[in-house]
Image (cartoon, rainbow, N blue to C red):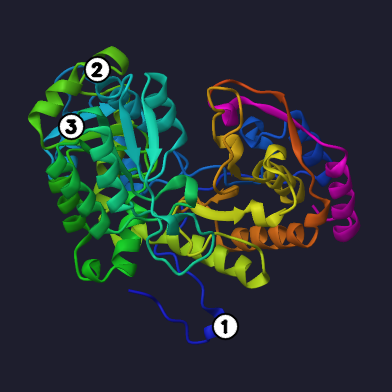
Amino acid sequence: MSVKFYQSENQVPLEMHKVRMIQKLSLLPVEERLKKIQEAGNNTFLLQNKDVYLDMLTDSGVNCMSDNQYAASFQADDSYAGSATFLRVRKAINDVFGCEYVLPVHQGRAAENILAEAFCGPGKVAFMNFHFTTTKAHATRVGSTVEELIQPKGLLPKSDEPFKGDYDLELLKKRIDEVGASNVAYVRVEAGTNLIGGQPVSLENMLAVTDICHDKGCLSILDASLLQDNIYFMKTREARCKFMEVGDIYRLLADHFDLIYFSARKLSFSKGGIITTKNESLYKQLMGYIPLYEGFLTYGGIDVRTMESMAVGLYESLDMEYISQGPEFINYLAKELDAYGVPVILPPGGLGCHLNAGAFVPDMPHNQYPAAAVGAALYIAGGIRGMERGTVSEQREPDGTERYAELELQRLAVPRRVFTLSQLKYVADRVKWLWDNRSLIGGLEWTEEPEVLRFFFGRMKEIGHWQEELAEKFRKDFGDSL
């Protein structure tokens, strides 16, 4: 249910919660911001949080928990085996998804590791609507290849398509037949497709994927980490879902997918992760990996207080007033930037507002890393830390050549229930200034390039002296202001 303002010019997203705890922030002068980003090798992951004003790097593990989640954490049972805390988590999974079998892991990529160990290997192909960095790295690490079968509409930066994360169903059937079902490691659907702008997948498309998998004898897996956002979009964009309860959508998906996993750093706004299924055989196939990689079956490497918060957060994820705030704030920011002419991914997805860096600096070649350059420039302009989701987030081909990203994006994640509307307006203001001064943004080149997951650890330097010129222009335009 939306809240309409009497004066339409005042219409903004309205939070259905109040803030009861704060954390002090600092905003460094532009000269210090310039120094800090260069010391960090132009990698926003290597910035210290104390030097960041608004941390829009990710929504993973940095969402604000509710009062009930904090309260629940004090009743934790830290027994190694037979833990009452695990029983409460298992009950929450059963109540929300309808799944009986539950395997805890310390976070989402731990689940990806176990799934890769169990199902991937040399000669196997993992199909995905679109890859995620760590998912692909785990599959390729053990010898599998990854193929993306997203519909072409998913790669259009700006369109009216409501579900840009949908699979190309005909291509999926064709590739399974060509590869052979026995050589398919799994077919993975990522709800809220991260690397193309947090774009959702329709319920109709998800169920069609599972029907294809069941017909051809392939394993279907749902990455439900961003399912909260995806369900918001199902409810608001898909006619079939408009009058469905949120919980009905969860359980319908669990009825059709063979396996579901998620990072609770996103789904439930806590931390940890879960693999769950209704299939006892799959459960038994996977359970041996938990003590090997994670911990005992009742905690899987997760602190028990966190597990209690996860259980409460899963129930809260059934509440549209809880799950709507993120997408609505993201929509507000994206529409404000779009109205000014800033190129952003539209329609807005979940997770964050995504700047189309390829259009921000259209003359910059891929091998000067436009998305990373725009991210470094934005930190200089406003102390705002985003995340590169472009070529730097890819991995090189086996022969050492670059695999250029289909989209060069700078992601401005919007952690749930963390930022105020005035802070988002500040972000919009600094992005608009940067857009007006985009001619000053130059490229980057590697100084330290790790072989795997280079976007986490790698270091780069500016080509020329464009960052100093950008800082000088900021000072000229803003005077003594931070």
Please give left or right for residue 221 compared with residue 128 in the image. left
Q: Look at the image and tell me whether residue 72 can be seen.
A: no
CA gap between label 3 and label 1 equals 48 Å
Do callouts 2 and 3 mark residues in contact (Cβ within 8 Å)? no
Give the foreground label among 2 and 3: 2
Marking on residue 9: 1
Q: Earlier in the sequence, mark 2 or mark 3?
A: 3
Residue 215 image-quadrant placement? top left
Asked if the magenta segment contains residue 328, the reply would be no
Q: Nearer the viewer, mark 2 or mark 1?
A: 2
Label 3 secondary element: strand
Q: Is residue 117 visible?
A: yes
Task: Check disc 3 and give the amino acid type.
Answer: Val
From the top left corner, tell me how far across and down residue 129 is, in percent: 36, 46
Callout in the foreground (3, 1): 3
Number of the label disc, if any, that sits on residue 403: none
| Vertical order, 185 against 158 (above or below) | above
Helix, strand or loop at label 2? It is helix
Q: How many marks?
A: 3
Q: Amino acid at mark 2?
A: Tyr
Quarter-of-image position of residue 102? top left
Percent x, y for residue 360? 69, 56
Residues in magenta, as a range: 453-482
Question: Which residue is under mark 2?
Answer: 289
Instruction: Tell me what residue is drawn at x 56 percent, y 63 percent.
Output: 333
Q: Label 3: which residue?
A: 102
Magenta span contains residue 461: yes
Task: Identify residue type, mark 1.
Answer: Glu
